[in-house]
Image (cartoon, rainbow, N blue to C red):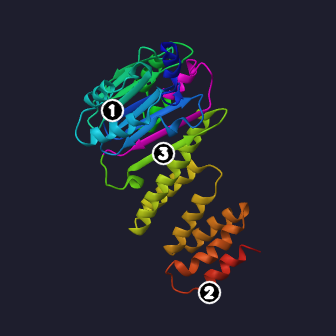
Amino acid sequence: MKAIEKKNIWHRGPLLHTYSIVARDSETGQLGVAVQSHHFAVGTVVTWAEAGVGAVATQSVGDPAYGKLGLDLMRAGKAAPDTLAGLLASDSFKSIRQVAMIDNRGRVAAHTGSRTIPEAGHIVGDGFSVQANLMLKNSVWPAMAEAYRGASGELVDRLLAALDAAEAEGGDIRGRQSAAILIVEAQGTGRPWHDTTFDLRVDDAPEPLVEIRRLVSVRRAYIHKRRADVASENSDLDTMEREYAAAESFIGENPEMRFWHAIALLGHGKIDEGISMLREVAARDRNWVELTLRFLPAMMLPPDSSLTERIRNLLK
């Protein structure tokens, strides 16, 4: 009977052998968690975060309850170390768990169970924790800690630097498959869709860290577009131009940011500039011009047959 119990202990949750990082940015207060693994859709279980509350990574033999209950307890005011200690005390399978938590004040705690498959371990630092199990080498998580401490830029850049360092050090002994990154704001508004800055997953790819960096860049484009839209509504054209330029630089070959930039210019009466941009977009795909014609009635501009004709001429 004991032999059967030992065998079945590894079926007490998804086998999420992986490396991850949880962190809080001391300047912005943003909270984040990032992960990579040779496991399909690792982000569906490992990554948890809530604006103004905390972030959690639950892995090895992962138990999503650590994410849900961890955030519930931190939202109620418990510090991350107390939260993790309490959940571990009631988990009879804590020897196979690996969990890290950080709260909105930067208090952090981690646990690597005694039966977690080597190479496994964690490092808790100032405002972050890195943890890994089933690694090729026991230098993976120290490399992550060093990379995070030494990285500059926004929180997303520093989290990605930690993941890259883990992979460069050998990473998961089985290789690569999926990755995820979740970053939320320092204060919650009650609207999670507004409070979440990055919520990106690569569920299955030969180079998940390469792909998630591409997705981060695309997401940044939309962040800058949103800022440009706000500036446009406020008639702050200098900021609008600057933010659209940033959006275009992050989006790559996708013409969408250039299109919305053109629409904004038309809306502010900068007809020649807007038409010029539309001509560039039309050179890639004429459907964007057809879309512009459909937008004109909704742009709350005085009827202008000459403008309509100029745009229509781009289809010729």
Indicate yes or no whether the magenta region holds residue 181. Answer: yes
User: Is residue 154 depicted above or below 118 in this figure?
Assistant: below
Viewed as shown, does residue 302 lie left or right of 56? right
Q: As rendered, which of 288 and 305 lies closer to the eye?
A: 288
The label number, if any, that marks residue 305 in the structure image: 2
Q: Which residue is mark 3?
A: 199
Quadrant in the picture for residue 263: bottom right
**Earlier residue among tags 1 and 2:** 1
Is residue 99 among what the camera can see? yes
User: Where does residue 239 sit, x and y in percent of width and height?
Assistant: 42, 59
Q: Position of residue 164 (x, y in %)?
A: 54, 27
Residue drawn at x 46%, y 19% is 141
Residue at left offset 63%, top offset 77%:
293
In the rendered view, would you say 218 is above or below 17? below
The secondary structure type at the circle numbered 3 is strand
Considering depth in this image, is 269 or 102 the residue closer to the camera?
A: 102
- Report helix, strand or loop for mark 2: helix
In the shown orientation, is residue 306 left or right of residue 244?
Answer: right
Identify the secondary structure beneath mark 1: strand
Residue 296: give x, y in percent of width and height. Answer: 57, 78
Badge 2 amino acid: Ser
Observer-nearest residue: 233 or 188? 188
Q: Nearer the viewer, residue 8 or 151?
A: 8
